[in-house]
Amino acid sequence: MIKNIQSKENFIDVLAITSEQDSPTSNAPQGSAVEWTLVTALEVVLNAFTFSLTSIIFKDEAEAPLAYLRNRLQMTDVQIIFLTLLINEEEMVSWKNVCEFLGCSRLQLMKYKSAMDELVDKRWVRRKKINSFGTQKEGFELEKGVIEALGNNEVFVPEKIDGFSEQDFVNKMSLHLKKHLKTPFRVDYEEESNWLLSFSKANPQLPLCQYVNEQISSDYNKVLLMLFIAKYAFSGIWDDESLDSEFFEDFFPDSYCFSVLIDEMISGTHPFFKEGLVDYACENGIANTSKYLLTSKAKQMFLSNYVVKTVKSQSGNNMLKSHTSIKEKTLYYNREDEHQINRLVSIFQQEYFLEMQNRLEQTGMRRGFACLFYGAPGTGKTETVLQIARKTGREIMMVDIASIKDKFVGESEKNLKQVFTTYRQLCEEMEVKPILFFNEADAIINKRLEDTEHSVDMMCNAMQNILLQEIEDFDGILIATTNLVTTLDPAFERRFIFKVEFHKPTPEVKAKIWVSMLPSLTEEEALTLASRYDFSGGQIENVARKRAVEYILSGVDPSFAEIESYCKNELIVQKKTVKPISGFAV
């Protein structure tokens, strides 16, 4: 017997949403027009039917509410009966439950299967499977929102799942699965898989859905491919597009079929591997057999028009560094270097920057500002970018060159294009344009290779061509840093409007840096260290940190002699004395 139903009369206890005066029963004056609601009409119908060996029979008093329900719900009489039964059940209703309630056999009920299937197609009802004592039961349950709609005397309107573009389809699917992709524990696999399969069937115009519906026979694999697509869509937020075997164990039911699925993924024998749709994730140059991601082939097949969305900066984009998080730091430059840096700080102040862009546009010139900071390591290039951002109130979109490059042909180029797509999105979202920062960009702005034969060389040249074109059309602030300006491609040199060389500090500047790092030094000691050791600012900072560590450990401030020993240890390459070979004069 269906839970909570002792008799048909008990049905009103479950549907007691409307007040007694709204009920069109014997209390209504004879001959008066009845103001039906969905709930009261369903109540009367449920109490006015019987089941015979051949059909469902309704009493005369059910004629008016049935006509009302047919018109409003656009359902048949049999579907209306099934709906009333499902409303009363908190969980799944199996075919056996329905047979017990109606007092009929499963064979007698089979002729009404198409009526229930139509309710599924209309998405008022969903199929459900549950495991009970080692056996699997099949049945139905109402879609979420049906009860609430009927209680408000409204016709339930299913969620729109058809007619989506590729971009909107992937975004909607990803948002629907977001909670599971991040934490898949206690997931209702049947509910999620049914939604995914319905969503796919409703959009046959998309390449992904065509492949899922026509080329994959197993529902398990259909769901799996869509999970990969959804996770890739969130790679712009979580910085990881892979799924792992642990996720599968949490998401999929504990059954033999899914044990086989996981084994096939780990061993690389799954059909997705054979079709070139999925590959192992590569970590530090080694394939991780427990983590998997889409290949460039799959992305090209299913996502050729899809652009990975990045979370807005206010939500904490993992590529963005807020200017408010940058600590103020005093930097010391040679006079000419300092003049150029101060000039950039002035230009990038918001009020001047907007005016300057407008004037450049009026004269037919490019609006973008691409800058190159070059010089020896440790001269303050990276820290200067951070301090410029802090002083001008601009976020920094940090670009990791190594993460852009991909082992798959064509994927690196797509990643680079995505960087600029993301930057343009951020510029539209933010009132103050951020700084696009390519740190240590040697690998991407060096001289292009000629007579390339290897795919890696071709990829590098292709990426450089993309970067050249993007800078040409750039509308914002781009800063790249490099230590190896001698290998800079001439085409890039022309595109950087500001090229700032960071020289090693003069003895006077180095003395100031020594004092700023080690306030206990006298002016004379600072000048001595500055003249004896040709250090960059970064090397001086290393010495200062060693001094701080020693003080923390011993509680004693190191002497000047000990500081000098730190300086000598900082020099990796020492001048070597050439020893004469025996028998020869030097």
Image (cartoon, rainbow, N blue to C red):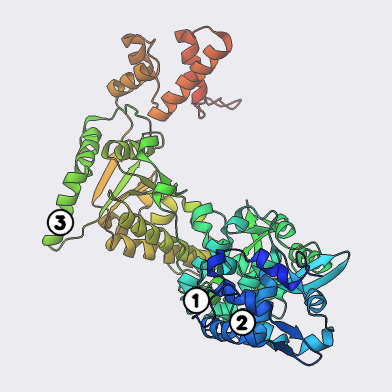
The residue depicted at 64 percent of the width and 71 percent of the height is: 142
Question: Gap between marks 2 and 3, in whole Å?
Answer: 56 Å
The residue depicted at 45 percent of the width and 69 percent of the height is: 451
**Would residue 295 be seen by someone viewing this image from the given angle?**
no
Front of the two marks 2 and 1: 1
Q: Are marks 2 and 3 in contact (CB under 8 Å)?
A: no
The residue depicted at 58 percent of the width and 77 percent of the height is: 41
Horizontally, residue 568 falls left or right of residue 373, namely right
The earlier-in-sequence mark between 2 and 3 is 2
So how many labels did they put on this image?
A: 3
Give me the disc on residue 35.
1
Question: Gap between marks 2 and 1, in whole Å?
Answer: 30 Å
Q: Is residue 102 above or below residue 332?
A: below
Give me the disc on residue 411.
none
Residue at mark 2 = 121
Quadrant in the picture for the N terminus? bottom right
Which amino acid type corresponds to the residue marked 1 in the rendered image?
Glu
Q: Is residue 535 above or below residue 265?
A: above
In the foreground, 438 or 558: 438
The earlier-in-sequence mark between 1 and 3 is 1
SS at badge 2: helix
Which amino acid type corresponds to the residue marked 2 in the rendered image?
Asp
Residue at mark 3 = 358
Horizontally, residue 387 falls left or right of residue 310, namely left
Name which quarter of the figure residue 105 lies in: bottom right
Tell me where residue 505 appears, x and y as whole percent: 31, 28
SS at badge 3: helix
Front of the two marks 1 and 3: 1
Horizontally, residue 136 falls left or right of residue 382, namely right
Name which quarter of the figure residue 250 lies in: bottom right
Tell me where residue 401 appears, x and y as whole percent: 46, 52
Would you call the spot at circle 3 few (<14 residues within 10 Å), some (14-19), or many (20 or more)? few
